[in-house]
Amino acid sequence: MTGSGHTGLHGLARSAPSIVPGGPSWAAHGTSGPFTMDAGWLPFHPQPSRPRFRLPPGSVDAHCHVFGPGERFPFAPERKYTPCDASKEKLWALRDYLGFERNVLVQATCHGADNRAVVDALRTAGDRARGVATITTTTTDAELAELDAAGVRGARFNFVKRLVDVTPPDVLAMLARRIAALGWHVVVYFEAPDLADLENFFRELPTPVVVDHMGRPDVTKPVEGPEFERFVQLMRTCPRVWSKVTCPDRLSASGPPLYTDFVPFARRLVEEFPDRVLWGTDWPHPNLRSHMPDDGALVDLIPAIAPSAVLQRKLLVDNPSNLYWGRQEA
Ligand code: 0GY
């Protein structure tokens, strides 16, 4: 056999397309199929830095998404936004590049309750990924079993009005009872001003309740102030409530790379509830307006919110392992 495949006819270097973040195939290339990404959409970072912080072995990126690709996994007609494609291959490349070993894929609202893109990704990842799905009253028991077999361990209830048409609480309560029987949990996404109306509903859910992005506090307010105190009280009084200490890029007003206003909020939860916190990149970071974060810099923020090796191990390894990989298989 002649040639290595790396040298072109004229002796010029012909590098294979690279899916390494920062390589030629890594960057976002719009949206495939009959879709056009929204005007002003910020695609994921084209060249994330390699983190200086060394993640502990077994670390889990416990909040990330796949989008499409649209030509293979169409976006839902009821979606509120059309993103750029963000494939499972790119997510796995980011996982390896940053130093994670596993992922938890969260169904994004642009795919509605069509979980095929997540399920496809879970099937290729095997034991290296778990998922959180969106289900409705039309989801059958057979479909729940299929999701479970693929690695889904939770259902997401979304209360953010710019993302979804809200589902009535009695419907959600009924869905929660169905998934409780499978040993799944509920993931909830809401904004801090809505917690007062929602917290009784959360307290009565029959499963663990995992809150996305700390319930979206306004981090320009004091960390000991009444808004965040309400959320801390919920976690204190309801031991089934967990929180993701995620999304400095979404919550911070002070901005990158240090996100100084976000840090005390996340650190407070990590220190007070070390066994009920999760961390994730939120790649590919939908609906950002101010900037697109460098995923490597997000990883480098972890020691600021989890200052000891013990806290880091709980946040990145033990907690997600218990919640997503802990179920004893028959
Ligand atoms: C996130 C946050 C957002 C979007 C979604 O499912 C989604 O569309 O979660 C957002 O726009 O705040 O967690 O990715």
Image (cartoon, rainbow, N blue to C red):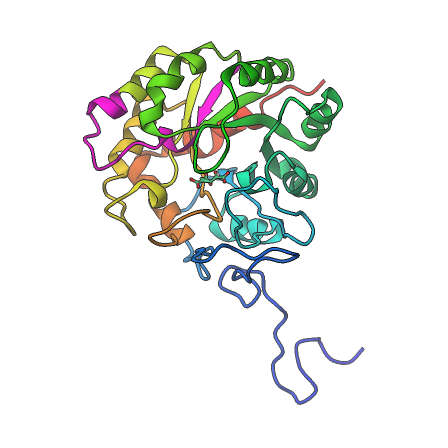
Q: Quadrant of the N terminus?
A: bottom right
Seen at 60% across and 18% down, the residue is 175
Q: Is residue 273 left or right of residue 111?
A: left
Please name whichever residue, 49 or 34, is drawn nearer the observer in this view of the structure: 34
Q: Quadrant of the C terminus?
A: top right
Residue 182 percent location from the top left of the image: 65, 17
Residue 219 vertical placement versus 135 (above, below):
below
Please name whichever residue, 131 or 308, is drawn nearer the observer in this view of the structure: 131
Seen at 27% across and 45% down, the residue is 259
Please name whichever residue, 240 or 317, is drawn nearer the observer in this view of the structure: 240
Seen at 61% across and 85% down, the residue is 12
Please name whichever residue, 279 or 214, is drawn nearer the observer in this view of the structure: 214
Seen at 69% across and 32% down, the residue is 150
Residue 188 vertical placement versus 44 (above, below):
above
In the image, is residue 215 part of the stretch drawn in magenta? yes
Place residue 272 in its image quadrant. Answer: top left
Residue 286 vertical placement versus 32 (above, below):
above
Place residue 271 in its image quadrant. Answer: top left
Count of numbered tags: 0
Residue 235 visible to an observer of this rendering: no
Residue 195 percent location from the top left of the image: 35, 22
Residue 188 percent location from the top left of the image: 46, 26
In the image, is residue 216 part of the stretch drawn in magenta? yes
Which residue occupies the extreme bottom position in the image?
A: 10
Q: Is residue 263 left or right of residue 62?
A: left
Residue 198 visible to an observer of this rendering: yes
Q: Is residue 223 left or right of residue 91?
A: left
Residue 64 vertical placement versus 324 (above, below):
below
Residue stretch in magenta:
207-229
